[in-house]
Image (spheres, rainbow, N blue to C red):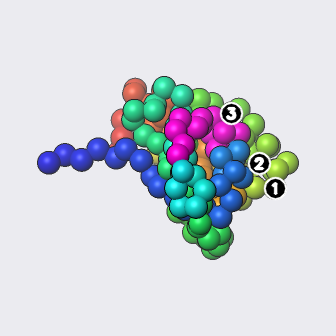
Amino acid sequence: MRPTLTHLALHVPDLDACIAFYQRYCGMQVIHQRPGKGTRIVWMSEPGKEHQFIFVIMPGGQDRHLASDDYSHFGFALASREEVDHVAAMAAQDGCLIWPPRDEPYPVGYYCGLRDPAGNYLEFSFGQPLGPGSEQMPIP
């Protein structure tokens, strides 16, 4: 048996705020929605990856209150340091930046962190052995 990771499902306190956040910061799109849990269940994906990995978001969750030293997060790769800086600047303006851009030795790279409307943390990185351009990088 060899399972494949296909989705992550989240209960969130404000479904529409989370949809807007993942559209704005992650470029994800709603690819499916249906009635459920008293309102609706939404599937979101990066364009072109609808058959590989999705977020399923559902209403009814509670706001997560992660500690400042809790590094639990969803990781998104970007194509350049400038893109990391751009996301960080947008997040600072929107009040959801939690880790300003920082540079750490390989394989961590250059990254920043955001908090979504449900309290989940997201990392946006460049230079990790995952994501754009990583095919040439060895994984330590």
Q: Position of residue 61 (x, y in %)?
A: 59, 67
Query: Which class describes the residues within 10 Å of circle 2: few (<14), some (14-19), or many (20+)?
Result: many
N-terminal of the pair, mark 3 or mark 2, is: 3
Please give the label number shown on residue 91. Answer: 2
Please tell me whether mark 1 sits on a helix, a strand or a loop.
loop
**64 falls in the magenta region:** no
Please state which amino acid type lies under the numbered disc 2.
Ala
Alpha carbons under labels 3 and 2: distance apart: 12 Å
Residue 120: image x %, image y %?
60, 60
Indicate the amino acid at tag 1: Gly
In the image, what residue occupies the spot 81% across and 55% down?
A: 95
Task: Tell me the residue that label 3 is attached to.
Answer: 83
In this view, the residue in front, 73 or 112, is 73
Which segment did they paint magenta?
22-34
Q: In what element is the residue under mark 3? A: helix
* Nearer to the camera, 62 or 102: 62
Q: Spatial distance from mark 2 to mark 1, Cα to Cα?
A: 6 Å
Q: Is 85 on the left-hand or right-hand side of 78?
A: right
Q: Do residues under tags 2 and 1 come within 8 Å of each other at their CB atoms?
A: yes
The x and y percentages for residue 46 are: 54, 34
